[in-house]
Image (cartoon, grey):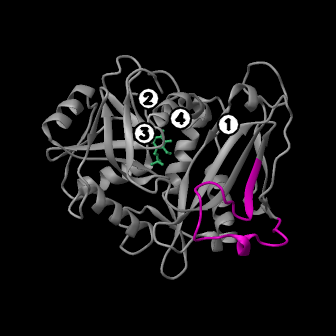
Amino acid sequence: MFDISNISIEKISESKITQTDFDNLTFGRVFSDHMFVADYKDGEWTSPRIVPYQKLAISPANATLHYAQSIFEGLKAYKDQNGNALIFRPEANWARMNESAKRMCMPEIPEEIFMHGLEELIKLDKNWIPNQPGYSLYIRPFMFATDEYVGIRPSDTYKFIIFTCPVSKYYAKPVRVKVETKFTRAFAGGTGYAKAAGNYGAALYPARQAQNMGYDQLIWTDGLSHSKIEESGTMNVMFIINDTLITAPTDTGTILKGITRDSVLTLARDKGLKVEERSLTVEELYQALENGTLKEAFGTGTAATIANIELINLRDKDYTLPTPTDSYFSKQVYKTLDQIKTGQIPDKFDWIKTI
Ligand SMILES: Cc1ncc(COP(=O)(O)O)c(C=O)c1O
C-alpha cells in the first residue's frame, strides 16, 4: 500500500533557473527543475518520488502510443505578496482527473498521492513561479499506460507524472474564432467530457484548417445536428446576450467541465448576473450577432484564463465584437479571479491551497 511518508526526493545537481529568461516565456516550452512520478503495477500505486525533470524511456510497443490510454490535467500556481505559493482549486483537478480515468479504463489516482506529490513538487520548485502580473506556474499532471503489449485491452501498468512550466499568457491578444458546423469534437456517449489526449489529437485537423483561414480557434457545435454551441478547443465559451450570461450545459457528456467555467459562473451569480446554463443555438447566436444583442463573448480556461473573443466567423461571415471596456463583465471577472488567485482579496469560496 502507498505510504505517504515514503516519498523520495532526488534534487537536481544544478538548477536551470538562472538560465531561464522569465521576461520572454513562451507557453509550454520552459520546464522547471523537478517532476513527481508514481507507478501503477500489480493493482496499486507505488514508488512516489520527485526526481529531476528528465526524458522517459519507453518501449516502441508502449500501449499509449498505439491506443491512446492517456489523460491529463492543467492547473496553475501563483505567488502572493508574501511569497507564498498559492494553487488554484487543485482538488477540482484531482476529481476531474479521476472522472477521465474512469472513462478511459485507467486506475484512479488517490487524493493523497495527487495532492502530496503536487505540494512537495511546488515546495521544491517554488522559485519557478513567476512574479510578473498575468504570469504563473502551469502545472501538468498526467497519466498514461505503460504496458509493452500490442493488442487492445486496458493496460495493467501506468505512470502518473506532474511537471510544471513557468508561463505567460496562452493567448497574447483577443481571439478570432470560427463556429465549426462540419467537423465534430465530441458526441453523446463519447469521451468529450474527459480530458483524454485523443480528444485533442482528433481536433487538430479541423482547427488547422480554421487557422489557415486566419482564425485562432474553433467553437465546436454538437456532433448530431451542428445546431448547438458547445465549447472551444482549450476553453469553455460564454456569451452575454442582452443582460444574460449563457454557456453550454455540461450534462450532455460532450463538454469539459471547466474549473474556470465553474469559477466564473460562481462569481457571476455572486454578482447578481443572470446566468443560463443551456444550449445556445447557432441560430440564436446568428440573430444576436445580426441584431447587436450579443454584448460579450469570451472563453474560460486555466491556460487561456479569460480570453476575449474579438471576432466570430459564423455562416461564412466575420462579425467583429466591440472592444471590452472596464465595465464589461469579462474584464471584471478576469480581475476578480486574478486577485483571488494571487491572494489580493479574500478567498471566500475556499478555492486556494496555500503551500
Ligand atoms: C476542451 C477544453 N474545454 C475547456 C477547458 C477549460 O477547462 P479549465 O477551466 O478547467 O482549464 C479546457 C482546458 O483545460 C479544455 O481543454
Which circle, 4 or 1, is nearer the viewer? 4
Q: Is residue 21 magenta?
A: yes
Q: Is residue 38 above or below residue 76?
A: above
First-in-chain label (4 vs 1):
1
Numbered badge on residue 194 = 4
Which circle, 3 or 2, is nearer the viewer? 3
Q: Is mark 2 within 8 Å of ligand 1?
A: no
Q: Are marks 1 and 3 in contact (CB under 8 Å)?
A: no
Amino acid type, callout 4: Ala
> Which residue in the structure is indicated by mark 2?
254
Q: Under tag 4, what secondary structure?
A: loop
Residue 114 picture location, percent across and down: 64, 53
Residue 118 in the figure: left or right of residue 43: left
Amino acid type, callout 1: Pro
Residue 27 in the figure: left or right of residue 14: left
Classed neighbour count for the residue bearing mark 4: other residues with Cα under 10 Å, few (<14), some (14–19), many (≥20): many
First-in-chain label (1 vs 3):
1
> Which residue in the structure is indicated by mark 3?
215
Q: Is residue 22 above or below residue 151?
A: below
> Which residue in the structure is indicated by mark 1?
107
First-in-chain label (3 vs 2):
3
